[in-house]
Image: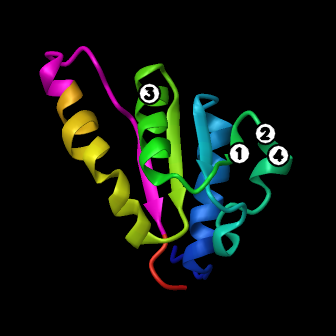
Amino acid sequence: MENKRKISFCQAINEALHQEMERDPSIVVYGGEGNIFGSNKGLLEKFGPDRFFLTPIAEDAMTGFGIGAAIGGLRPIYSHIRVDFALIGLNHLVNMASVLYYGSGGAVNVPLTIRAAIGR
């Protein structure tokens, strides 16, 4: 049976975030703007400020925060409001997050997801 349901890309992201946060209590979503074109709609109301929170626009620091949170057992999802600023955190991704697993012989995982909006 073919599914004829049509939703926008933002609605699909929002639905996936809600479903995964319900399924896994270790998921936290954070970033520099609350709603990001509707993709984070309802997360604060449903999951509270411990699992969805705003952060300063400090991409380098917030990427490092996400790596530390992931190493500590959380599954962070960091939402950048603009992809061009996401590159500021690239040092953490390339020189820390990407090598921790292999450098630790598989003992350290970094389950970090980074979302970045491109255009509208």
Residue 86: x and y, percent?
Answer: 40, 61
Front residue of 72/94: it is: 94
Cα distance in 3D space between marks 3 and 4: 25 Å
Applied colour scheme = rainbow
Place residue 23 in its image quadrant: top right
Residue 68: x and y, percent?
Answer: 44, 27
Cα distance in 3D space between marks 1 and 4: 12 Å
Crowd rating for badge 1 (residues with CA inside 10 Å; few <14, some 14–19, many 20+)? some
Q: Is residue 112 left or right of residue 4?
A: left
Above or below — where is 117 with respect to 111? below
Q: Earlier in the sequence, mark 1 or mark 4?
A: 4
Cα distance in 3D space between marks 3 and 1: 16 Å
Is 109 inside the magenta-drawn segment? yes
The residue singled out by tag 4 in the image is 46
Cα distance in 3D space between marks 4 and 2: 9 Å
- Picture disc at residue 53: 1
Place residue 42 in its image quadrant: bottom right
Q: Is residue 8 left or right of residue 111?
A: right
Q: Are marks 2 and 1 in contact (CB under 8 Å)?
A: yes
Is 6 inside the magenta-drawn segment? no
Crowd rating for badge 3 (residues with CA inside 10 Å; few <14, some 14–19, many 20+)? some
The residue mark sitting in front, 2 or 3, is 3
Residue at the spot 30% in from the left edge and 42% down from the top edge:
92
Q: Quadrant of the C terminus?
A: bottom right
The residue singled out by tag 3 in the image is 68
